[in-house]
């Protein structure tokens, strides 16, 4: 497996923390060359510095995934630094806890702009670069259990992740002739900074009364009996970036400990 991502150039958006940082760190440990892209440049710098200190190759970059000019600049920076782009992870995303009847148009638009439109833009611009290179490529999008089921406290987030699945399938059909595969993976409950935010929001809405109650209750249906960590996700993400997954496209691969069975 390690040889199959060696020297591949991979961009990971939202990799200043959480799942994105884990994806990038694992790829770098196996010889890939990483662009650590995040809206928070300081966070991206920190992850890139850590990878380099461990003997990997990484460069930090700023990006707003909802802005096409910013994404174009990111891809140009990757090409300028490493010469090409082989793998694009559209991982950046946001969430919000909100009872169904209280979701506003502004809430919906904010989440869809990053989680939905951001994946569309990232897929399109990465594909243009890969087509120009003429040697195929891999685009991997971060979906969720929320891309397969609607949850009443996350309706707009679920809508955005259903959109990720749809964009992935459409792109897989559109780009196959260029030898570009497009897949997504679906995490369940992952112990990251994002769930710390959601946990606080549950309490603010009066839905829970103490810290970690939300994540613990939401995790009751996990067949494997525990919340996941980012390291549980990287076996799948590195596989999707590697040559081992060359014959897989248009798929949503669940990495959720058995929360959603499809």
Image: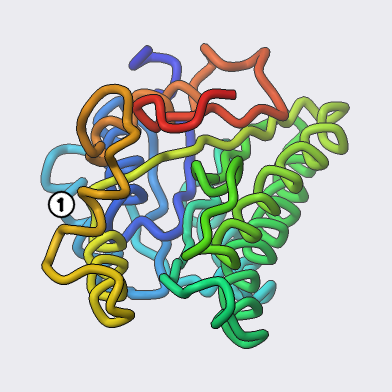
Give the residue number, with chain letter if any, for mark 1: 50
Residue at left offset 19%, top offset 47%: 52
Question: Which of the 4 image quarters holds residue 174?
Answer: top right
Q: Is residue 43 left or right of residue 167?
A: left
Q: Residue 147: x, y in percent?
A: 59, 46
Instruction: For residue 59, say whether it is visible.
Output: yes
What is the secondary structure assignment of the residue under circle 1?
helix
Residue at left offset 53%, top offset 74%: 64
Q: Is residue 115 above or below residue 236?
A: below
Q: Is residue 55 above or below residue 251?
A: below
In the rendered image, the quadrant that contains the N terminus is top left
In the rendered image, the quadrant that contains the C terminus is top right
Q: Say which of 57 and 170 sits in front.
A: 170
Residue at left offset 82%, top offset 35%: 175
Q: Is residue 244 left or right of residue 19?
A: right
Q: Is residue 99 above or below residue 12?
A: below
């Amino acid at each position: 497996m390690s040889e199959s991502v060696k020297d591949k150039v991979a961009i990971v958006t939202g990799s200043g923390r959480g799942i994105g940082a884990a994806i990038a760190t694992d790829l770098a440990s196996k010889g890939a060359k990483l662009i650590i892209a995040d809206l928070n440049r300081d966070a991206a710098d920190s992850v890139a510095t850590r990878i380099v200190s461990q003997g990997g190759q990484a460069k930090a970059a700023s990006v707003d995934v909802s802005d096409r000019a910013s994404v174009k600049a990111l891809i140009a920076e990757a090409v300028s630094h490493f010469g090409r782009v082989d793998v694009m992870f559209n991982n950046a995303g946001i969430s919000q806890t909100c009872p169904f009847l209280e979701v506003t148009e502004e809430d919906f638009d904010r989440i869809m702009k990053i989680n939905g439109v951001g994946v569309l833009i990232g897929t399109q611009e990465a594909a243009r670069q890969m087509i120009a290179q003429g040697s195929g490529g891999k685009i991997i999008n971060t979906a969720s259990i929320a891309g397969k089921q609607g949850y009443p406290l996350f309706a707009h987030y679920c809508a955005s992740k259903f959109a990720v699945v749809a964009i992935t399938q459409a792109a897989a059909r559109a780009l196959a002739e260029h030898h570009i595969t497009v897949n997504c993976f679906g995490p369940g409950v992952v112990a990251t900074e994002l769930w710390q935010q959601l946990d606080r929001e549950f309490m603010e809405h009066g839905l829970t009364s103490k810290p970690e109650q939300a994540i613990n209750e939401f995790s009751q249906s996990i067949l494997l009996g525990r919340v996941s960590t980012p390291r549980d996700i990287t076996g799948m993400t590195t596989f999707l970036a590697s040559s081992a997954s060359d014959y897989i496209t248009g798929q949503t691969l669940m990495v959720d400990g058995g929360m959603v069975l499809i």
